[in-house]
């Protein structure tokens, strides 16, 4: 109807294709076929309901114009015997009334088409918002956008898959997410499309504790074969490579993601970490300093900046980050901050007394929580207390029962360290290879 009325209002003048696209689709990116089909529908209805009353003339490479109405009055066009009216008085009201059937047909087609186009545009924008939220680890923003998208098209596989992955939380982990909801959404997505990349990624992460490294790697590579630009799948794969010490393979994936999204925090802070792990500290500093300037609020950007300071003999710079709320890594609990304050002096000055104090503090902290156990493993390894670090790691990962005490402090016990196979994916436990 919008296309038809625009041609009527032009009163025989040519209406360009661009004008018709703007009127009918509001600037949405649609192909020429959409306009061609609409013009053909108008012509078909005119032939069915008022043969010869008007025609739509094609102007090659330009547009269309409506002809024929000026040769007949409204009454003549309707087939009545009323006196003719001046053609210049032909109005939109008459044109809308020339045939009830045409009105019904055109209105039905027009309203359905406009509504569908509007829904498609809104749905695409919401999906883009949801996917972009993953690049900035903005989980709540992504969930909201995807909920709105699913209210428009509830059965869309991509929307369901994205929702499944986003439900898992930051970086695809379940610590801040909802694994149960993720499982439900992934099942629904895979029912609609068994190859949906995000649904398969969510399924792989949910089953990670039951898979070995090779099986997980195969699954992630299959997802990337299907969707080679899926940065979320790349993140999972480079995390897997880091967890088994394949730092160069992980670095290659990070660089691949950087080429796709150079201005996103989820590609920059991992790049800084990989450069540091590979011994390119100067380059790591440049990358992470730029990331801090661009995304000072991002939890993993701050974390990476702190870790690079702490483990490259810049303990004082790391300590200063703990002193301000604007620089303190958001993931650090009060207990973690306290442990870092006891560990940083030894990382800055590796005297026997400092190392002994830090070792004892980290072994005691490892009894409290898995998060502090990760921190203890990294610090003890950096201080050369490798046996103590392995004792904590083995207790955490349940590879074997903890051994005897290291030094004056008790080793982690079964009741003190949370154990379980799901911890095997942690890349925090192995910094360098």
Image (cartoon, rainbow, N blue to C red):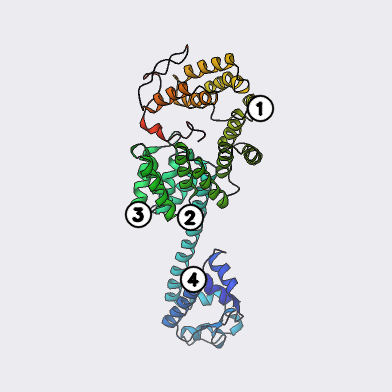
Element at label 1: helix
Question: What x and y, as percent, mark residue 152?
Answer: 44, 53
The front one of 305 and 46 is: 305
Residue at the limit of the structure toward the top, as seen here: 408
**What residue sits right under mark 1 in the picture?**
317
Q: Mark 1 or 4 closer to N-term?
A: 4
State the separation of the CA atoms marked 2 and 4. 19 Å
Pointers 1 and 4 in contact (C-beta within 8 Å)? no
* Residue 77 visible (yes or no): yes
* Residue 10 visible (yes or no): no
Q: Nearer the viewer, mark 1 or mark 2?
A: 1
Q: Residue at x 46, y 22 (%)?
A: 387
The front one of 416 and 47 is: 416
Question: What x and y, as percent, mark residue 20?
Answer: 56, 72
**What residue sits right under mark 2 in the picture?**
123
Pointers 3 and 1 in contact (C-beta within 8 Å)? no
Q: Quadrant of residue 394?
A: top left
**What residue sits right under mark 3 in the picture?**
192
- Mark 3 Cα shell of 10 Å, populated few (<14), some (14-19), many (≥20): some
């Amino acid at each position: 109807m919008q296309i038809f009325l625009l041609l009527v209002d032009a009163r025989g003048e040519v209406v360009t294709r661009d004008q018709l696209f703007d009127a009918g689709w509001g600037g949405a990116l649609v192909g020429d076929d959409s306009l061609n089909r609409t013009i053909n529908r108008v012509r078909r209805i005119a032939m069915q309901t008022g043969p010869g009353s008007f025609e739509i003339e094609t102007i090659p490479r330009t547009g269309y114009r409506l002809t024929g109405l000026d040769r007949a009055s409204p009454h003549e066009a309707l087939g009545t015997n009323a006196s003719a009216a001046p053609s210049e008085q032909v109005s939109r009201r008459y044109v809308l009334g020339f045939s009830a059937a045409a009105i019904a047909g055109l209105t039905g087609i027009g309203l359905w088409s406009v509504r569908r186009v509007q829904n498609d545009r809104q749905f695409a924008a919401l999906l883009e918002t949801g996917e972009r939220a993953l690049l900035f680890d903005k989980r709540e923003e992504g969930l909201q956008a995807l909920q709105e998208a699913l209210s428009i098209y509830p059965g869309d596989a991509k929307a369901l898959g994205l929702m499944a992955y986003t439900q898992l939380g930051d970086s695809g982990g379940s610590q801040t997410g909802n694994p149960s909801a993720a499982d439900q959404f992934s099942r629904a997505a895979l029912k609609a499309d068994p190859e949906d990349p995000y649904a398969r990624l969510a399924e792989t992460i949910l089953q990670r504790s039951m898979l070995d490294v090779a099986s997980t790697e195969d699954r992630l590579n299959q997802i990337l074969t299907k969707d080679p630009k899926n940065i979320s799948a790349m993140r999972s794969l480079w995390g897997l490579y880091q967890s088994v010490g394949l730092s160069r393979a992980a670095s290659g994936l990070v660089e691949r993601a950087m080429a796709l999204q150079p201005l996103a925090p989820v590609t920059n802070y991992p790049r800084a970490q990989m450069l540091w792990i590979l011994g390119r500290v100067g380059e790591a500093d440049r990358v992470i300093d730029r990331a801090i300037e661009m995304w000072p609020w991002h939890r993993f950007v701050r974390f990476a900046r702190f870790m690079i300071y702490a483990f490259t003999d810049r303990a004082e710079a790391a300590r200063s980050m703990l002193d301000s709320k604007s620089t303190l890594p958001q993931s650090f609990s009060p207990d973690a901050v306290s442990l870092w304050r006891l560990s940083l002096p030894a990382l800055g000055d590796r005297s026997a007394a400092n190392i002994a104090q830090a070792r004892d503090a980290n072994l005691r902290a490892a009894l409290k929580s898995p998060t502090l156990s990760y921190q203890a493993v990294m610090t003890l390894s950096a201080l050369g207390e490798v046996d103590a670090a392995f004792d904590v790691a083995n207790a955490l990962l349940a590879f074997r029962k903890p051994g005897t005490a290291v030094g004056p402090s008790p080793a982690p016990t079964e009741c003190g360290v949370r154990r379980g196979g799901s911890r095997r994916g942690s890349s925090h436990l192995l910094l360098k290879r």
